[in-house]
Amino acid sequence: MKMTAPGPTGAEMLRQLRAIQRAPHEFLLNCARTYGGVTQFPIGNLPVYAVSDPAGVRHVLQDNARNYTRDTLQFNTLALVTGEGLLTSDGDYWLQQRRMMQPAFHRQRVAAFGQTMVGATKKMLTRWDALPDGVTLDIDHEMMKLTLEIVGRTLFSVDLSAAASDMVQAVLITLDYIVYRAQTPLALPPFVPTPRNRAFHRALQMLDDSVYRLIAARRAESTGIQNGDLLDLLLAARTEDGQPMSDRQLRDEIITLIIAGHETVASGLSWTWYLLAKNPAASSALAAELAQRLNGRPPAVDDLPHLPYTRAVFDEALRLYPPAWLITRRARAADEVAGHIIPAGALVIISPYVVHRDEKLWPEADVFRPERFLGESVPRFGYLPFGSGPRLCIGNTFALVEGALILATVAQRYRLRAAAGHSVQAEPLVTLRPQGGLLLRLERVGN
Ligand code: HEM
């Protein structure tokens, strides 16, 4: 029998407004624990349905994915920056772009980036080595710089973290603006020349100019030169009827990959270091696996199948703190999700943070236990750090390889320690970030 989903009333929402604004991920988790796997509540006069039941997740993201569009505040705001890139486009256009770009993210292609990933990490460690042992660093900031360098080098062979610092500033300003707009739905529209809107448009212009310059320079290079980066692959990609991408399409996809591909990985790694610092036994098990397999040498992609615990540590961190904590869709037509009616036009929310902390799927859900990912089967549609169905993250292999290589390179040389009683709150922005950064003490291991 079809049921109306239970959930808090408008009056209850108003009473909790501050708490909801401060920690929407916790609000969603409480809703699921109180009302179940499909709940509804109003935001203004918009009906919102939060789905965490695995069968419901499967229905929305996979089985009936065509009924769910990206016409939501989350994606419309992102589109101000990423245009019609893969993350924000929909329908036939999205499918055409996805088909064109998919080969660039195949495992073998990603494997070719392994050396770049390790090289950038070693460069960071050289900088750390020059610091006094025991120094405290904002590890979140370090991870952001590192992943930005990696995305820049793998995309277009440029070190974004150093050479193009204007571009980095522009990326950060546009990301801040996305958060501001998502949190302030009543803000004046982007075309109104408020100081904030103008700063955003300046940053966007700067970003566009840099990306168009990169594309033009690459097009001007004599053909046949291979840089071996993603831009080469995007330039060579063709639609089914043989069309290449226009400059505008390339611009949208490149900016999408910068935005989707760096803060997510950085957040995932920051939480990994935090969890390791809080769990010395896991940290020792990780060090033991790395010592046994690598014996002090830098890791390579071929080592990854032999480093199951390293991978499990990253998987488990992505379970507890999934960087993409919120996935939103708009229902095209009315639908039934896990026995509940969803009306046409409703906003549907799936929060991996909520699904990953469901005690029925993950006993002792709040406990960090990488062993869950060794041997035990992972509940289908109960683990979705990269989403699921046709819109599964195109960069998921890239992210897992990058995460494991960075972890293996750093953890061989350093143990990151938290001060006693140190606790960090999660702040749900575009990704789930450690609030106020992540201060950890560097402790050199071995020589
Ligand atoms: C730990 C790191 C990452 C996480 C947690 C993550 C998470 C996600 C999630 C959940 C989605 C699906 C969103 C939805 O269905 O609404 C997604 C899509 C996407 N991700 Fe990632 N991502 C990560 C890394 C990357 C990297 C490294 C890249 C590129 C280099 C990337 C590029 C993209 C793109 C282009 C999409 C849109 C795919 C499409 O709709 O066809 N991501 N990501």
Image (cartoon, rainbow, N blue to C red):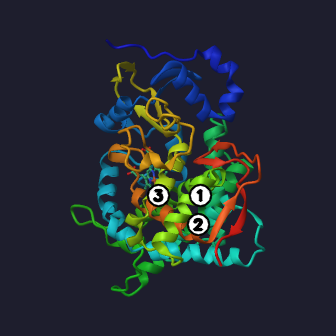
Cβ–Cβ below 8 Å for labels 1 and 2? yes
Relative to 291, residue 223 above or below: below
Quadrant of the rendered structure where residue 106 is? bottom left
What amino acid type should be assigned to the residue bearing mark 2?
Ala
In this orientation, does residue 191 appear?
no
| Observer-nearest of 90 and 323 | 323
Q: Are marks 3 and 1 in contact (CB under 8 Å)?
A: no
> Which residue is tagged 3?
309
Give the mark nearer the N terminus: 3 vs 1: 1
**Ligand 1 within 8 Å of the CB at mark 1:** no
Rendered residue at 39%/56% (across/down): 394
Numbered disc in front, either 1 or 2:
1
Q: Which residue is disc 1 drawn over?
A: 283
Q: Quadrant of the N terminus?
A: top left
Q: Compared with residue 360, is residue 144 higher up or lower down, i.e. above or below? A: below
Disc 3, SS: helix
At 36% from the left and 63% from the top, the residue drawn is: 105
Residue 17: x %, y % from top left: 68, 25
Residue marked by disc 2: 411
Residue 36 appears left or right of 433 = left
In the figure, 213 relative to 192: above or below?
below
Where residue 263 sits: x, y (%)?
57, 56
Looking at the picture, which amino acid does disc 1 mark?
A: Ser
The Cα atoms of the two marked residues, 1 and 2, are separated by: 8 Å
Question: Along the line of sight, which residue is nearer the eye, 207 or 18?
Answer: 18
Residue 33 visible (yes or no): yes
Label 1 or label 2, whichever comes before in sequence order: 1
